[in-house]
Image (tube, rainbow, N blue to C red):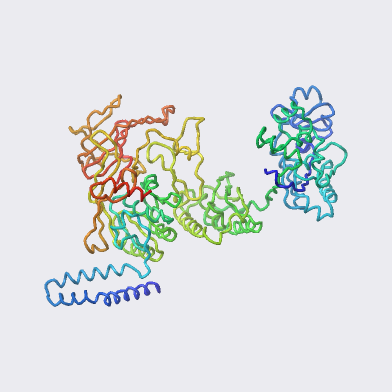
């Protein structure tokens, strides 16, 4: 509880800082406020901005993130103590996990019996630092919270309906333990929501070939729908089982350079 | 062993014909009778009177009976023979710590400690022999020399002396006159014999480098032994007293929480005793005896070492067997026995000044999760052999060892390999990369239809009845949508040698109109989705 109140004090002081540094911005806002028509919208924008600031603490640590996703996530990286939600795509979940795992962070996967372990290993997740609880049963919340105590990244899928209070408790635990939560599905307090809006596979034809690579349009919506969604076209994965951004019209020298960097 | 290690002053206490003495003991026959202990139809050991009749070790049983018609022969029972020797080792351990059992009837210890304690080596040897005589073995012998081999030979040297001490640095000279056969390396001895080498001294005089070049490492070791440069150290056994904990319940208990409470103190004591002896337990066996006389036993491993609450957890999991903590057991439990199977010096497991701390944290955390969802609930993954994606992932409960052989991918007899080897093995017919990110625990039935809305099938010859056009992930056919691309069939015919486990299926990769790719399998007219590339 004491910690919570400190948090509030901290976020209060952040607001204060914002007022101090964004003096000009505030003046603009004050000006626009005088004209009544767009006022509501402006206030909403400011409110969402405050909300965005409140999600972060002063000492928020950024977690090593896969280079393909750095441009997409708010703040340019994954953060500890925050939650991210991913819609439908396990490949995106793995891309999020790959960064921390390559940095020596333990990952825990709760409630996902279908998690493709071999693909995870190929995409850069260290199996020696991966613990799976495929079927937590009724103890989903306890298990996920216990996992958050020890591992750096907790990946989970919500088991049916979860009460708001459970979500709030888990979120608090995540923040307290500086873990990163990745939820496959909807999560109300997520820092960002990642989804694949379109995907096209190459290497496979009608009756011939096999899947070799996929280009996907990944769209990231920041907290509370604030701001425009950021989009990027990514290889998920490319022919060498790597995640990387699609660069222009696949110019071969650039790709060669990227391989040097990746290797 | 490295010959450069200076031989340690070693003491070997040897009871001659121990298998015979022990067997005579529990068969209740007199040692004066001609007795032979038989292993695999050959004489393994014999008593003095049998020896006087001409019975020798290695003789066929018929031959031995022909030489000594009154011969009593018994089958060699190594377990009983070893067990019978146990009191002697305990007696020795009471007098001097760090006793190594060389074999039943013979044990070694470092001479320095006892020699200091009893004044000199002779006095120490005398004290040991007196103790053995109290226990009923009057003809035990002691040999003291530099190195275990020399000490062993000194103890076994025929003669009337019960104690034979080879002075320091005299071992090479003592060994030089002994016959080559004592090396117990039949092939080498035979060859050296043909080369005209008759004694250990002759062999020891050969240049060490030449022996190593000609006879390899085993030859070099034998050479070092022959020259009295035996580097074999005395490796003391770990005394067994601290290794088990038994809790008896009177009256028998039938509730898991009562039992776990009942063993708590015992398991504290068990771990504390080990800790006092500077050991940690890394594997243990739990034996649960019920009132009906059933014994349920199981071995448990620990990734680090067992603490007392870990021991209680293991017992609880074993009792529980999937049911909840409140449920009653089928039969009340009378006894819980915890035996340490593998113990190790705690110095090997000390937490380093840096590092290792976080792993311990992980372990505690995951053990906590295990206490919630059960031992099999928390898994670690590794990649094994196989063709289907599900088969390839090996999930092992946290704390257990990776099985030597991948259990889900049986191979023809005689070609069993470790899972690491299976992973490297090429596995023709496995999926090309990229691999599916979602692998269904159980393949899900799906619908694949041709343009005329008939199910697609594969003929005996491996041809498609019609190209697949529509797909739905619901078996009811709801949400039917066209396919953008497809590839296959890729036939798989597995374990054709096994009538129960043989499988024949055709795999397909398809991409549906939403851009989602699937791995499908058609087995006997039924379409299933094995995995999804999402």
Q: Is residue A242 above or below residue B67?
A: below
Residue under the point 47% across and 30% down = B412
Residue under the point 31% across and 41% down = B444
Q: Describe residue B295's horizontal placement relative to residue B366 as left or right.
A: right
Question: Residue B139's quadrant in the figure?
Answer: top right
Viewer-nearest residue: B50 or B162: B162
Question: Residue furthest toward the right?
Answer: B160
Viewer-nearest residue: B175 or A142: B175
Q: Is residue A23 above or below residue A243?
A: below
Q: Visible in this render: residue B135?
A: no
Q: Visible in this render: residue B248?
A: yes
Q: Describe residue A45's horizontal placement relative to residue A253 as left or right.
A: left
Viewer-nearest residue: A8 or B289: A8
Residue under the point 46% across and 55% down = B366
Query: Residue B42 location in percent, x, y?
Result: 72, 27
Query: Residue B409 location in percent, x, y?
Result: 44, 36
Q: Is residue A50 above or below residue B320?
A: below
Q: Describe residue B318's horizontal placement relative to residue B428 as left or right.
A: right
**Total labels drawn:** 0
Query: Residue B297 location in percent, x, y?
Result: 56, 45
Residue under the point 37% across and 29% down = B493
Of the 4 image quadrants, the one containing the N terminus of chain B is top right
Q: Is residue B356 above or below residue A13?
A: above
């Amino acid at each position: 509880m004491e910690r919570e109140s400190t948090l509030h004090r901290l976020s209060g002081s952040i607001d204060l800082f914002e007022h101090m540094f964004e003096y000009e911005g505030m003046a603009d806002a004050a000006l626009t406020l005088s004209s009544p028509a767009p006022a509501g919208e402006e206030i909403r924008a400011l409110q969402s901005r405050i909300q965005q600031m409140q999600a972060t603490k002063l000492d928020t640590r950024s977690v090593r993130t896969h280079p393909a996703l750095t441009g997409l996530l708010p703040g340019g990286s994954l953060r500890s103590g925050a939650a991210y939600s991913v819609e439908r795509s396990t490949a995106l979940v793995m891309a999020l996990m790959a960064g921390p795992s390559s940095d020596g962070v333990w990952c825990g996967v709760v409630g996902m019996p279908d998690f493709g372990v071999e693909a995870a290993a190929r995409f850069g997740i260290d199996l020696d630092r991966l613990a799976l609880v495929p079927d937590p049963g009724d103890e989903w919340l306890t298990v996920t919270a216990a996992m958050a105590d020890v591992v750096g990244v907790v990946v989970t899928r919500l088991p049916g309906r979860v009460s708001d209070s459970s979500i709030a408790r888990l979120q608090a635990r995540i923040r307290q333990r500086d873990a990163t939560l990745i939820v496959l599905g909807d999560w109300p307090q997520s820092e960002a929501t990642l989804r694949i809006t379109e995907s096209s596979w190459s290497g496979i034809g009608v009756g011939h070939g096999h899947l070799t690579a996929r280009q996907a349009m990944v769209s990231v919506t920041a907290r509370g729908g604030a701001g425009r969604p950021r989009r990027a076209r990514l290889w998920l994965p490319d022919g060498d089982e790597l995640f990387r951004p699609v660069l222009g019209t696949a110019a071969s020298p650039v790709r060669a350079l990227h391989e040097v960097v990746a290797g | 062993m490295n010959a450069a290690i200076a031989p340690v002053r070693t003491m070997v206490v040897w009871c001659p014909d121990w298998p015979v003495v022990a067997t005579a003991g529990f068969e209740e026959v007199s040692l004066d009778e001609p007795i032979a202990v038989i292993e695999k139809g050959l004489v393994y050991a014999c008593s003095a009177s049998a020896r006087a009749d001409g019975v020798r070790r290695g003789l066929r049983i018929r031959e031995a009976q022909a030489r000594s018609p009154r011969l009593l022969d018994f089958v060699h029972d190594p377990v009983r023979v070893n067990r019978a020797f146990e009191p002697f080792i305990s007696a020795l351990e009471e007098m001097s710590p760090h006793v190594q059992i060389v074999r039943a009837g013979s044990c070694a210890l470092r001479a320095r400690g006892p020699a200091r304690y009893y004044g000199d080596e002779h006095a120490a040897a005398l004290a040991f022999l007196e103790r053995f005589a109290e226990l009923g073995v009057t003809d035990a012998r002691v040999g003291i020399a530099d190195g275990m081999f020399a000490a062993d030979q000194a103890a076994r040297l025929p003669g009337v002396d019960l104690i034979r001490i080879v002075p320091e640095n005299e071992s090479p000279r003592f060994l030089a006159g002994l016959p080559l056969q004592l090396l117990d390396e039949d092939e080498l001895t035979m060859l050296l014999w043909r080369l005209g080498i008759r004694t250990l001294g002759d062999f020891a005089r050969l240049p060490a480098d030449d022996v190593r070049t000609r006879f390899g490492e085993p030859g070099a070791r034998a050479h070092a032994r022959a020259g009295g440069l035996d580097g074999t150290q005395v490796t003391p056994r770990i005394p067994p007293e601290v290794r088990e904990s038994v809790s008896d319940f009177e009256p028998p208990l039938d509730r898991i929480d009562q039992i776990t409470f009942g063993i708590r103190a015992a398991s504290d004591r068990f771990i504390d005793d080990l800790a006092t002896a500077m050991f940690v337990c890394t594997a243990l066996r739990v034996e649960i005896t019920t009132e009906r006389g059933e014994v349920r036993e199981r071995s448990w491993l620990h990734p680090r070492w067992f603490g007392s609450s870990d021991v209680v957890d293991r017992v609880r999991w074993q009792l529980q067997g999937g049911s909840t903590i409140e449920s009653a057991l089928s039969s009340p439990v009378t006894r819980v026995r915890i035996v340490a199977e593998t113990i190790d010096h705690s110095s090997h497991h000390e937490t380093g000044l840096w590092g290792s701390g976080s792993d311990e944290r992980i372990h505690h955390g995951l053990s906590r999760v295990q206490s919630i969802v059960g031992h099999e609930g928390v898994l670690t993954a590794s990649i094994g052999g196989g063709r289907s994606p599900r088969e390839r992932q090996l999930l092992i409960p946290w704390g257990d060892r990776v099985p030597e052989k991948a259990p889900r991918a049986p191979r023809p007899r005689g070609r069993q390999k470790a899972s690491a080897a299976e992973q490297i093995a090429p596995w023709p017919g496995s999926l090309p990369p990229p691999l599916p990110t979602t692998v269904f625990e159980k393949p899900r039935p799906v619908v694949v239809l041709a343009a005329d809305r008939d199910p697609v099938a594969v003929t005996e010859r491996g041809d498609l009845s019609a190209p697949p056009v529509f797909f739905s992930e619901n078996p009811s056919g709801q949400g039917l949508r066209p396919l953008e691309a497809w590839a296959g069939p890729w036939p798989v015919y597995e374990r054709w040698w096994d009538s129960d486990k043989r499988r024949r299926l055709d795999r397909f990769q398809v991409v549906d109109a939403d851009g989602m790719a699937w791995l499908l399998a058609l087995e006997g007219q039924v379409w299933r989705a094995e995995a999804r590339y999402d």
